[in-house]
Amino acid sequence: MLTDPLTAAIAEAEKLVATAPHIRTEDDLTEGYGYLAGGIAACVHAAWAHSSTHPVFITGTGPYAKMGLDNPDTLYWGAAVRDNAEYVVTGRRGSTCDLSFQVLAGNYTDAAVPGNVTAFDDRALRIADDGTFEVRFGPGPADPERNYFTLAPGSSQLVVREVYSDWTQRRGTLRIDRLDTLGTPAPAPTHQDAVKRYERAGRGLVSRVKTWLQFPEWFYLKLPVNTVTEPRRTPGGLDTQYSSVGHFDLADDEAMILTLPATDAPYLGFQIGSLWYISLDYIHHQTSLNNTQARVDPDGMVRIVVSARNPGLVNWVETLGRSRGILQFRWQRLDRELTASDGPVAQVVPFEGLADALPFHDANRITPDEWAARIAARQAAIADRMLG
């Protein structure tokens, strides 16, 4: 049957999920099956939206199709490009904190990270007073005066990120056109084309599961548990992004306190993730905080509490019952180097000892009604992004 490659891939991916090395509980496996469902949807969508002649921006990760430790503060868009063609990206700048562009060579796999051809944010662009812009990518020499960036040999993907430091900020608009096909119809689909797309979706699904199971092993789980790294430039990442990472393993009667100075960076985000290398539910729970959402103590420090139990504190980040998971900080749109003094310090304390360990504990208390208002604001903000 035409769909055999996809159904075979789904069965293979299900086995990969069911036998993942980090599974300890039924909840871990249940989360994995939800993760698999999102991957199936995303890979089928990507395979049928893909066009090398008439590219479009699609999103491969979001609230219901997660991968790659997706950042709750970020909208991700990607389009296929070829290094011998010329493209124009047009749009209108929204009010989000950051808008960045990255050209990659190749794909993320369980064997390698793709090469980073170029990365920049909108500060490198000439943007009109009304917020509109036009960016060109092609094989020619770079020309900042006309927003032209070179597609080096091997370039295969253009990734665009919109980052919210305040969830009430508004998204912009974005479109990509390949100049030599603009104004012409896309090729009519054929039976063989359908065969190839089902095969592409199947390969993509298996690769997706294998790849993101490997990343925690490479970059997180070899670090000492319940610690975080100093800020460092994100490997292969954005031009102005630093990150600090770690992983936690906490008993129900323990809590982790992460302490760091309030930043001068336009964006700082913290999240925890599961060992499926995806975000936790950030719509109905506070599993992430950024520099707008987190409360700063009078001494200029931010103190985040990670725990399964509710401490009744405004900067509580919920583990949703998980004892293990990933810790991730991101700073973006930087114009200076970060040092160890900018980064977080992790401390594990008894849950009942939080009041003694936090110097401004009482000032950070939050009532159930106030907490519900915070969650309602998260729910409304994600809905306003029109993500479903």
Image (cartoon, rainbow, N blue to C red):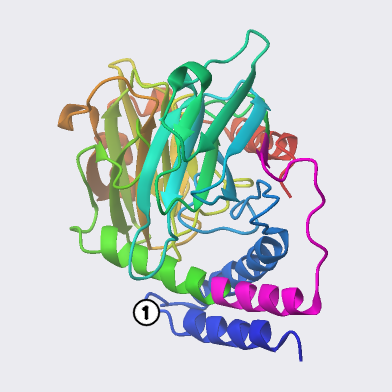
Q: For residue 288: magenta? A: no
Left/right of residue 290 with respect to residue 253 in the rendered view: right
The image position of residue 352, as x and y in percent, is 33, 47
Left/right of residue 206 with respect to residue 254 in the rendered view: right
The image position of residue 193, as x and y in percent, is 73, 73
- The image quadrant that residue 360 belongs to is top left
- The image quadrant that residue 186 belongs to is bottom right
Q: Can residue 15 be seen by looking at this rendering?
A: yes
- The image quadrant that residue 334 belongs to is top left
The residue lying toward the viewer, choosing from 347 and 148, is: 148
The residue lying toward the viewer, choosing from 151 and 140, is: 140
Q: For residue 199: magenta? A: yes
The image position of residue 209, as x and y in percent, is 49, 72
The residue lying toward the viewer, choosing from 224 and 243, is: 243
- Residue 356 vs 154, above or below: the answer is above
Q: Amino acid at mark 1?
A: Pro
Q: Secondary structure at mark 1?
A: loop
- Residue 326 vs 127, above or below: the answer is below
The residue that label 1 is drawn on is: 21
The residue lying toward the viewer, choosing from 232 and 46, is: 46
* The magenta segment: 175-204
- Quadrant (top left, top right, bottom left, bottom right) of the N terminus: bottom right
- Residue at left 69%, top 68%? 44
- Residue at left 31%, top 47%? 256
The image position of residue 212, as x and y in percent, is 43, 65
Category of crowding for the residue at label 1, using alpha-carbon neighbours closer than 10 angstroms: few (below 14), some (14–19), many (at least 20):
few
- Residue at left 26%, top 21%? 336
Q: Can residue 312 be seen by looking at this rendering?
A: no
